[in-house]
Amino acid sequence: MAAARRRANGAAGSRSGNVLNLTGQWQLNKEKSSSMYPHMKAMGCDEIAALASEKLEIILNIVQTDTAITVWQKSQLGITKRMLRLQGETIENSEHGDRRINTNLSLTEMIVDTKFKQGRLVDHRTAKRETDGSLVLCTQLTLTMKDHPEPIKTMRYFVKVGDPDPTVVSIHNQAVASGVFLPATTISASTIRNEAKLAAQAATADEENGGKPPRVPT
């Protein structure tokens, strides 16, 4: 297990085995990334949920081995989890219908092609070294919905900040060894909307109180 963890951690952004390996922990660069608002609206999210997506601080923990890739996305809303086969098709079950995912790898890119009932999402991933030495994960999301045939493209940039969480590495390796892939978990639009409302209410209360915490009766 320790050897497997070292192999996963040491491969971050590398091109070992003739394919791009994105193992690592990555932090969203919000200033450089495109707005997710058009993407979220096209997916059917309401105004509050779509606007809330703009405020998320996102960390990705990615573990990639020969046959699979695991991605845990952490934000203020919690953690979403996804594990995909790198050889063959992955089917994710959802209350809105199954999603069929195919992942294609090359020396310089990874393409995750997800087809679902309402449309298709193609996630094109590459990694590049900046002049300051930092490693950046570049993801181009191309969303095509049946009721919105014009593709919506969104660029997202994540800076490598370290190795993936050891817990994610361990769970990934156990799943690969057992041959039983973990089901995907997502955060619903209602959860995003409710959290956005709570944040807005807290901000309003703070402004009304002059930026000071409310007084507690004694």
Image (tube, grey):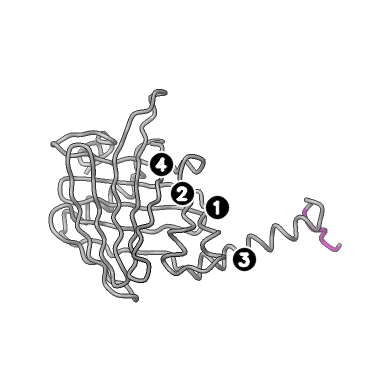
Magenta region = 213-217
Whether residue 215 appears in magenta in the rendering, the answer is: yes
Of the pair 60 and 157, the residue shown nearer to us = 157
Q: CA distance from mark 4 to mark 1?
A: 15 Å
Q: CA distance from mark 4 to mark 2?
A: 11 Å
Nearer the viewer's eye, disc 1 or disc 2?
A: 1
What residue type is disc 4 on? Tyr
The residue under label 4 is 157
Q: CA distance from mark 1 to mark 3?
A: 13 Å
Q: CA distance from mark 3 to mark 4?
A: 27 Å
The residue under label 3 is 197
**How many C-alpha atoms fall within 10 Å of the one at disc 1: few (<14), some, or many (≥20)?**
few
What residue type is disc 1 on? Lys
Under circle 2, the secondary element is: loop
Residue drawn where x is 26% and y is 61% of the image: 114
Quarter holding the C terminus?
Answer: bottom right
The residue under label 2 is 58
Under circle 4, the secondary element is: strand
Q: Position of residue 101 (x, y in %)?
A: 22, 61
Q: Upstream in the sequence, badge 2 or badge 3?
A: 2
Q: Upstream in the sequence, badge 3 or badge 4?
A: 4
Quarter holding the N terminus?
Answer: top left
Q: Position of residue 188 (x, y in %)?
A: 44, 68
What residue type is disc 2 on? Ile
Residue drawn where x is 23% and y is 46% of the image: 110
Q: CA distance from mark 1 to mark 2?
A: 9 Å
Nearer the viewer's eye, disc 4 or disc 2?
A: 4
Q: Upstream in the sequence, badge 4 or badge 1?
A: 1
The residue under label 1 is 55
Q: Main secondary structure of the magenta part?
A: loop
Q: Position of residue 196 (x, y in %)?
A: 58, 62
